[in-house]
């Protein structure tokens, strides 16, 4: 595997780990998330990093579109967070955290471990 792609996979893993660390000492509660501006901004920043890393991976090797589920949607979310910040839905971001990040983490760890 290209060493740049491996670096970006690690960037994704570290960003996911960071998001998980925000909830280590508290249960994942949507309303607590929604009312904590600093937490929301931190999560959004990590989602930007994840989306940018996926984008770079796809630019380098399009085959990763089949190896990372919803790769294009991940890049799309990154673009939304950066460029359409005023249309970000707390519910949408929360859904990503609960439903999609765990799967992405499994896929990324698997890709890293097969190096």
Image: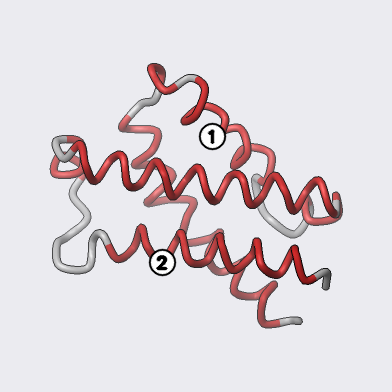
Count how many numbered circles sit on residues in the image: 2
Between residue 58 and residue 73, name the one nearer to us.
Answer: 58
Q: Position of residue 92 (x, y in %)?
A: 39, 33
Determine the residue positioned at 45% across, 61% down: 16
Taking the image as shown, residue 89 lies to the left or right of residue 108, namely left
Taking the image as shown, residue 43 lies to the left or right of residue 105, namely left
The quadrant holding residue 104 is bottom right
> Element at badge 1?
helix
Say few, some or many: other residues with alpha carbon within 10 Å of mark 2 (under 14 / 14 to 19 / 20 or more): some
Determine the residue positioned at 76% across, 81% down: 115
| Location of mark 2 (residue) | 17
| Location of mark 1 (residue) | 77
Taking the image as shown, residue 22 lies to the left or right of residue 96, namely left
Does residue 105 lie above or below 37 as drawn? below
Looking at the rendering, in which quadrant would you find the N terminus? bottom right
Q: Position of residue 105 (x, y in %)?
A: 53, 65
């Amino acid at each position: 595997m290209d060493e740049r792609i491996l670096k970006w996979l690690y960037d994704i893993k570290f960003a996911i780990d960071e998001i998980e660390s925000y909830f280590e000492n508290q249960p994942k509660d949507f309303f607590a998330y929604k009312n904590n501006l600093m937490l929301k901004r931190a999560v959004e920043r990590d989602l930007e990093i994840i989306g940018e890393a996926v984008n770079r991976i796809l630019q380098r090797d399009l085959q990763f579109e089949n190896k990372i589920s919803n790769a294009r949607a991940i890049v799309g979310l990154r673009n939304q967070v950066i460029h359409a910040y005023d249309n970000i839905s707390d519910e949408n971001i929360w859904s990503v955290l609960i439903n999609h990040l765990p799967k992405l983490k499994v896929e990324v760890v698997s890709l890293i471990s097969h190096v």
